[in-house]
C-alpha cells in the first residue's frame, strides 16, 4: 500500500461507487468498506469516516434505503438497497463520469502535448 | 408543519447511525479476533481503523440538518438572549403589547360569539325573521296577525321552508310550595322544524299539537332545564302545573338563542284560549304573533324579499282598512343571525374600533421604544453587517426578536382577555341572546396570533427603516450621522400619532360618559326616593278564584297591603298591576265616546294600569288635574279612569278631558269594555327608559277590574336609611310569602335601583371606552416623556455646550418644553379634527349630547394639553439640571 501516492477522490466518486456496489448486491457499511478495497485491488481505501456520512447523504436524497437485517452469521446489520431514484441517478452519474474521464484522458493523452 | 417529520427523522437517523457504527466496530473486532489477534487488542485496532466515531456521527447528523428550521432556532436563541439582556425593555414592550392585544382579543371574542359564529340551528343562514312595522321607526314593531301569516304562507314560495308563529306568554309554574314566573313561547307545530332545532331529550312539538282538543305540552329550553330542573334527565313525560293547568313535559331543546325574547319553555297554543280563539285566528288586525321563516331549498333571500313585497302590496290593496296608508306599514325579511346581533352590533363594533385605537397607540409607543433602542443597537448591527451578515439575515434577526416579544405580549394579552371575558359576557348579555356563545375559540386564538405577527412586522419595519442607510454606508465609515434625521422624524410622527389617537379616544369616552350622566338626570316623572316595589301575581296562582271577577283576589291584595303598611318605617303602600316605570303594561286600543274612527285610521292606544287610590302618592306620581281615585271607586260604582298628561293631550288636544268618556276597544279578555269617565290627569312617566318617549297611560281603579297582575309600591318614611329600606323589603317579601306561598315574588327593588339598571348597559359602555381612553392617555404620556427624555439624553453634549456658553437653565427648559409642546400641539390638533370627523359614528349611542358637544371637546383638549405638558415637563426640567462641567468632561 503506497500511502504517499494516494489522492482524494473527486466529489461524488464515493457515492457513485457505493451505488454501483449495492446495485449489484445489497450490502451493509462494513461489507462496502471491504468490497471497495477488494474491487479496487487495494488502490482505493475508503475511510469509515467518509463512508457513513456518504450513506447518510444518499439516504436523505432517497437514492438508497436501509433496513436492519440478520447476516448469515446471525449479526444484526443495516443493509442498504438501491431505490429506483438511485438507479436512475447512478446511470446519469456513470455516464457523466465517463464523459469526464474521456475528456480528461483526451487532454492528458501524450499525443496532444 | 412539513418540517416536523424531517425533524423527528433527524433524531431517529442519529440513533440508527450510532447502532450501525457500533455493529461495524464489533464485526471488525470479530474478524481480527478470528485472525488470531487477542480480543482487547482487536477492539483497539478496530477503533483506530475506524477513526473518530463522534465526528462521523456528527457528520451524519449534519446531513439531516434542516436549514431553515435550524437557523430559525439560532435566531430564536439569539433573540431570547438579546431580550434577556434588556429585561426592562422586554417587560415594558411585552406589557404594552399585552394591553393592546388583550383588549382587541377580548372584544373580538365577543364579536365572534355574538355576530360571526354560525348559528347552532340547522342551516342557520337560511333562517329568517319577519318584521312588520309602522312609521318606519325601529321601535314600532307590530307583529303579525295569524291571517297575515296565512297569506304569506300561500303567496311566498321562496319561504317554502315554512313560516312559524310564536307569541310570548307569561304564566306561573307551580310545584309544591314554590312558584316560578315562566316566559313561554306559544308556538305552532312547525316552529322547531322551521328554526332547525332538534330535541336534546324527548321530542319537540309538531303540527299535530296545534289547535284545540289536544293536551298542552311543554318543551323546556336547555338553559331552563338546567337552571330549574338541575338537568334532570328523567324530566320527559313528567306532568307540571302551569297557571293551574296540567301539562306534560315532552322534551328538552338543544341550546339555542331566541329572538326577540328569551324563552324558558315552549308550549303548543292550547294552553291559552285566546291564542286558539276566533279573534286571534281570524282577525287581520289582531297582530299578536312573531314570525320566523325558512328559505325554500334553492331560494335566495332576494327572491323571498321580492315575493313578500308582492304579496304585501296586494294585501294592502285588498284590505285598506287593515293597513292605514298614513302609518307606513312595512314588512322586512331579516336573516335571523342579523336580527340576533341587531342590538349588539353598533356597540360591539364601537368597542372593537376603540380597542383597535388602543392597539395603535400601544404599537406606536413600542415602536418608539424600539427606535430608541435601535440607536444603541445600530453599532451592533453595523458590526454584524461588516462581518458579512447579509441585510436579509439581519432583517430576519430583528423580525425574530420582534416576533418573540409580540408573542410574549400576545400570550399575556390572552391571559388578560380570558380574565375579561366573564365581564364582557355579562355586559353583552344585555344586548344579545348569544352572549353564552362567547369564549376564546380557535378563531379568537388565530386572531391574537395574526395581531402578534402584524405587530412584529410593523416593529421590524420601523426598527429597520432608519438603519438601512447606516448598513449601506458601513464601508464609508459613517457612523452617527446616517439615519438620524429620518429616525427623529419617525419618532416625532409616532408621538403625534399617539396624542392624536388619544384625543379621539378621550372624545368618544367623554361623549359616552356625558350620555350616561344625561340619562341618569332624566326625570322619571316620579318622586321615587325611598320607594320600594314588589310584585306578586296572586290571580295567576289561583285561577279558579276568578269566578267572582277577581274580587277575592283584590281583597287578598288589600289584606297583604294592610300587613305591609303595619311594618315600621312604612308610610304608604299602593297596589298596582304593573310596577312604576316598567314597560310591561298591555298597550290597548282606546275609543273616545262620540268620536268614531275614520276607516283605516289607527286607534289611539294607551298602556293600561290598574292602580289603587294610594298608588299615586306612594309612587310619587303627581295628580295634575281632577280628582284622585277614592276608596268608593269599587267594582259596582261608576267606572272611572285617570289618564296621563300625554294620553290626555293625544285624546283631547283642544278640549278638557275631565268628564269625557273612553272605552277599551280591545280588551284581550282581560278587561271589561265599559265606558269609563276620566276623573283626573296625572304626570307622564318614562316607562320606556330615560331615552324613550313618555308612555301614554290609562289608570283604572284596582278594584274595578279583575287584577290580572299585581304588586305593591311601598313608600318608606323619609328618615329610613338604605339598610332600613332593605329591611322593609325583606319583611314585605316574608309577608307575601306567608299569605301566598305559591306565588313568585319578583322585582323586589327600589325604583332607584330599577332606573340604575336601565342605564347600566350604557354605563358599562362608557366605563369600557373611558378605561380604554385612560389607558391610551397613560401610554401616550409615557411615550412623550420617553421620547423627549431620550432626545435630551442624546443632546446632553449640545445642552452642556449651550449652558457653558451662557444659556440659562430656564431657557434650556423652555427649549425642551417647546419641542415637546409642538408635538403635543400638532397631535391635539390632528386628534381634534379626527374626533370631530368621526364622532358621527357615535350618534346612535348618544343621548342628550351632540356628537360635537363643545363641552366634551373642550374638556378633552384641556386634559390632553395638561397631560402633554406634564409629560414634557419631566425631561425638560432634567435638561435644565444638566451640569455643563460634567458633560463636557465626560465627552471630551
Image (cartoon, rainbow, N blue to C red):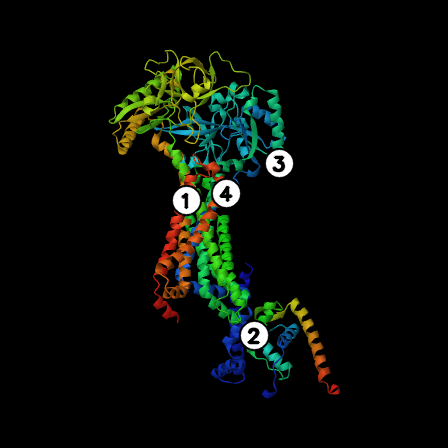
Closer to the eye: label 3 or 1: 1
N-terminal label among 4 and 1:
4
Residue A52 is tagged as: 2
- How far across and how far down the image is residue B367, in percent? 46, 57
Tell me how far mark 2 sits from mark 4, CA to CA. Answer: 72 Å
N-terminal label among 3 and 1:
3
Instruction: From the image, tell me which residue sits under label 1.
Output: B860
Q: Is residue A65 left or right of residue B439?
A: right
Nearer-the-camera pick, B112 or B605: B605
Closer to the eye: label 1 or 2: 1
Instruction: From the image, tell me which residue sits under label 3.
Output: B300
Closer to the eye: label 3 or 2: 3
Tell me how far mark 3 sits from mark 2, CA to CA. Answer: 68 Å
| SS at badge 2 | helix
The quadrant of the image that shows the C terminus of chain B is: bottom left
Tell me how far mark 1 sits from mark 2, CA to CA. Answer: 75 Å
- How far across and how far down the image is residue B38, in percent? 49, 84
The quadrant of the image that shows the N terminus of chain B is: bottom right
Q: Is residue B314 above or below residue A65?
A: above
Amino acid at each position: 500500500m503506497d500511502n504517499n501516492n494516494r489522492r482524494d477522490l473527486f466529489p461524488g466518486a464515493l457515492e457513485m461507487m457505493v451505488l454501483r456496489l449495492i446495485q449489484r448486491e445489497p450490502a451493509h457499511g462494513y461489507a462496502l468498506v471491504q468490497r471497495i478495497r477488494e474491487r479496487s485491488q487495494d488502490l482505493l481505501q475508503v475511510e469509515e469516516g467518509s463512508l457513513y456520512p456518504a450513506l447518510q447523504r444518499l439516504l436523505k436524497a432517497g437514492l438508497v434505503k436501509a433496513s436492519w437485517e440478520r447476516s448469515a452469521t446471525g449479526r444484526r446489520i443495516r443493509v442498504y438497497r438501491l431505490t429506483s431514484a438511485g438507479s436512475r441517478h447512478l446511470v446519469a452519474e456513470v455516464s457523466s463520469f465517463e464523459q469526464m474521464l474521456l475528456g480528461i484522458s483526451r487532454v492528458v493523452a501524450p499525443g496532444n502535448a | 408543519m412539513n418540517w416536523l417529520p424531517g425533524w423527528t427523522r433527524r433524531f431517529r437517523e442519529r440513533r440508527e447511525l450510532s447502532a450501525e457504527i457500533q455493529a461495524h466496530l464489533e464485526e471488525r473486532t470479530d474478524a481480527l479476533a478470528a485472525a488470531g489477534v487477542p480480543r482487547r487488542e482487536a477492539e483497539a485496532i478496530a477503533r483506530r481503523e475506524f477513526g473518530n466515531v463522534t465526528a462521523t456521527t456528527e457528520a451524519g447528523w449534519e446531513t439531516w440538518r434542516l436549514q431553515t428550521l435550524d437557523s430559525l432556532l439560532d435566531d430564536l436563541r439569539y433573540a431570547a438572549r438579546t431580550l434577556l439582556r434588556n429585561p426592562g425593555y422586554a417587560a415594558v414592550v411585552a406589557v404594552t403589547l399585552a394591553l393592546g392585544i388583550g383588549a382587541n382579543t377580548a372584544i373580538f371574542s365577543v364579536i365572534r360569539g355574538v355576530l360571526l359564529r354560525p348559528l347552532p340551528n340547522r342551516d342557520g343562514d337560511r333562517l329568517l325573521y319577519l318584521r312588520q312595522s309602522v312609521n318606519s321607526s325601529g321601535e314600532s314593531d307590530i307583529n303579525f296577525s295569524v291571517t297575515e301569516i296565512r297569506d304569506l304562507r300561500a303567496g311566498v314560495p321562496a319561504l317554502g321552508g315554512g313560516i312559524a308563529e310564536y307569541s310570548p306568554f307569561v304564566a306561573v309554574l307551580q310545584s309544591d310550595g314554590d312558584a316560578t314566573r315562566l316566559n313561554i313561547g306559544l308556538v305552532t307545530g312547525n316552529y322547531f322544524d322551521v328554526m332547525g332545532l332538534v330535541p336534546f331529550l324527548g321530542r319537540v312539538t309538531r303540527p299535530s299539537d296545534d289547535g284545540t282538543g289536544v293536551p298542552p305540552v311543554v318543551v323546556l329550553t336547555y338553559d331552563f332545564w338546567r337552571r330549574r330542573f338541575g338537568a334532570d334527565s328523567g324530566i320527559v313525560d313528567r306532568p307540571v302545573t302551569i297557571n293551574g293547568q296540567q301539562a306534560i313535559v315532552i322534551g328538552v331543546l338543544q341550546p339555542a338563542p331566541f329572538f326577540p325574547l328569551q324563552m324558558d319553555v315552549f308550549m303548543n297554543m292550547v294552553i291559552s284560549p285566546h291564542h286558539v280563539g276566533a279573534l286571534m285566528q281570524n282577525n287581520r288586525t289582531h297582530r299578536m304573533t312573531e314570525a320566523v321563516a325558512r328559505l325554500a331549498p334553492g331560494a335566495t333571500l332576494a327572491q323571498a324579499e321580492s315575493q313578500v313585497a308582492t304579496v304585501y302590496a296586494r294585501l294592502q290593496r285588498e284590505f285598506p282598512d287593515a293597513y292605514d296608508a298614513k302609518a307606513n306599514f312595512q314588512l322586512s325579511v331579516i336573516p335571523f343571525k342579523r336580527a340576533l346581533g341587531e342590538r349588539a352590533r353598533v356597540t360591539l363594533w364601537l368597542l372593537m374600533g376603540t380597542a383597535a385605537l388602543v392597539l395603535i397607540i400601544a404599537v406606536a409607543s413600542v415602536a418608539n421604544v424600539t427606535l430608541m433602542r435601535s440607536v444603541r443597537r445600530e453599532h451592533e448591527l453595523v458590526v454584524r453587517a461588516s462581518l458579512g451578515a447579509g441585510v436579509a439575515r439581519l432583517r430576519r434577526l430583528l423580525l425574530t426578536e420582534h416576533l418573540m416579544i409580540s408573542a410574549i405580549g400576545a400570550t399575556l394579552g390572552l391571559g388578560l382577555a380570558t380574565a375579561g371575558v366573564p365581564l364582557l359576557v355579562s355586559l353583552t348579555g344585555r344586548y344579545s341572546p348569544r352572549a353564552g356563545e362567547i369564549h376564546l375559540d380557535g378563531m379568537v386564538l388565530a386572531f391574537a396570533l395574526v395581531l402578534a405577527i402584524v405587530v412584529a412586522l410593523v416593529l421590524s419595519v420601523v426598527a429597520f427603516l432608519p438603519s438601512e442607510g447606516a448598513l449601506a454606508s458601513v464601508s464609508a465609515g459613517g457612523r452617527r450621522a446616517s439615519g438620524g434625521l429620518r429616525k427623529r422624524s419617525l419618532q416625532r410622527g409616532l408621538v403625534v400619532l399617539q396624542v392624536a389617537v388619544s384625543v379621539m379616544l378621550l372624545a368618544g369616552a367623554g361623549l359616552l360618559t356625558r350620555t350616561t350622566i344625561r340619562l341618569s338626570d332624566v326625570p322619571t316623572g316620579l318622586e321615587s326616593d325611598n320607594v320600594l316595589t314588589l310584585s306578586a301575581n296572586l290571580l295567576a296562582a289561583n285561577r279558579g278564584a276568578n269566578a267572582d271577577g277577581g274580587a277575592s283576589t283584590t281583597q287578598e291584595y288589600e289584606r297583604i297591603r294592610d300587613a305591609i303598611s303595619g311594618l315600621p318605617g312604612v308610610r304608604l303602600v299602593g297596589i298596582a298591576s304593573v310596577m312604576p316605570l316598567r314597560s310591561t303594561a298591555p298597550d290597548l286600543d282606546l275609543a273616545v265616546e262620540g268620536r268614531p274612527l275614520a276607516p283605516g285610521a289607527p286607534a289611539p292606544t294607551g298602556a293600561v294600569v290598574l292602580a289603587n287610590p294610594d298608588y299615586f302618592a306612594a309612587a310619587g306620581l303627581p295628580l295634575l288635574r281632577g280628582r284622585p281615585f277614592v276608596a268608593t271607586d269599587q267594582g259596582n260604582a261608576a267606572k272611572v279612569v285617570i289618564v296621563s298628561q300625554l294620553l290626555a293631550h293625544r285624546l283631547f288636544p283642544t278640549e278638557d278631558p275631565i268628564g269625557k268618556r273612553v272605552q277599551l276597544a280591545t280588551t284581550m279578555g282581560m278587561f271589561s269594555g265599559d265606558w269609563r269617565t276620566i276623573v283626573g290627569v296625572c304626570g307622564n312617566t318614562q316607562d320606556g327608559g330615560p331615552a324613550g318617549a313618555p308612555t301614554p297611560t290609562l289608570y283604572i281603579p284596582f278594584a274595578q277590574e279583575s287584577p290580572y297582575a299585581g304588586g305593591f309600591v311601598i313608600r318608606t318614611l323619609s328618615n329610613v336609611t338604605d339598610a332600613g329600606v332593605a329591611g322593609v323589603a325583606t319583611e314585605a317579601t316574608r309577608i307575601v310569602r306567608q299569605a301566598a306561598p305559591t306565588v313568585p315574588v319578583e322585582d323586589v327593588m327600589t325604583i332607584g335601583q330599577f332606573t340604575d339598571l336601565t342605564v347600566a348597559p350604557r354605563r358599562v359602555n362608557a366605563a369600557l371606552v373611558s378605561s380604554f381612553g385612560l389607558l391610551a392617555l397613560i401610554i401616550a404620556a409615557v411615550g412623550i416623556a420617553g421620547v423627549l427624555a431620550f432626545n435630551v439624553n442624546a443632546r446632553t453634549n449640545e445642552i452642556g455646550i449651550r449652558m457653558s456658553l451662557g444659556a440659562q437653565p430656564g431657557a434650556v427648559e423652555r427649549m425642551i418644553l417647546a419641542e415637546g409642546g409642538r408635538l403635543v400641539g400638532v397631535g391635539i390638533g390632528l386628534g381634534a379634527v379626527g374626533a370631530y370627523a368621526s364622532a358621527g359614528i357615535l350618534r346612535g349611542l348618544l343621548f342628550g349630547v351632540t356628537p360635537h358637544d363643545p363641552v366634551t371637546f373642550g374638556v378633552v383638549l384641556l386634559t390632553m394639553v395638561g397631560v402633554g405638558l406634564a409629560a414634557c415637563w419631566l425631561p425638560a426640567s432634567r435638561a435644565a439640571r444638566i451640569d455643563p462641567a460634567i458633560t463636557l468632561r465626560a465627552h471630551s
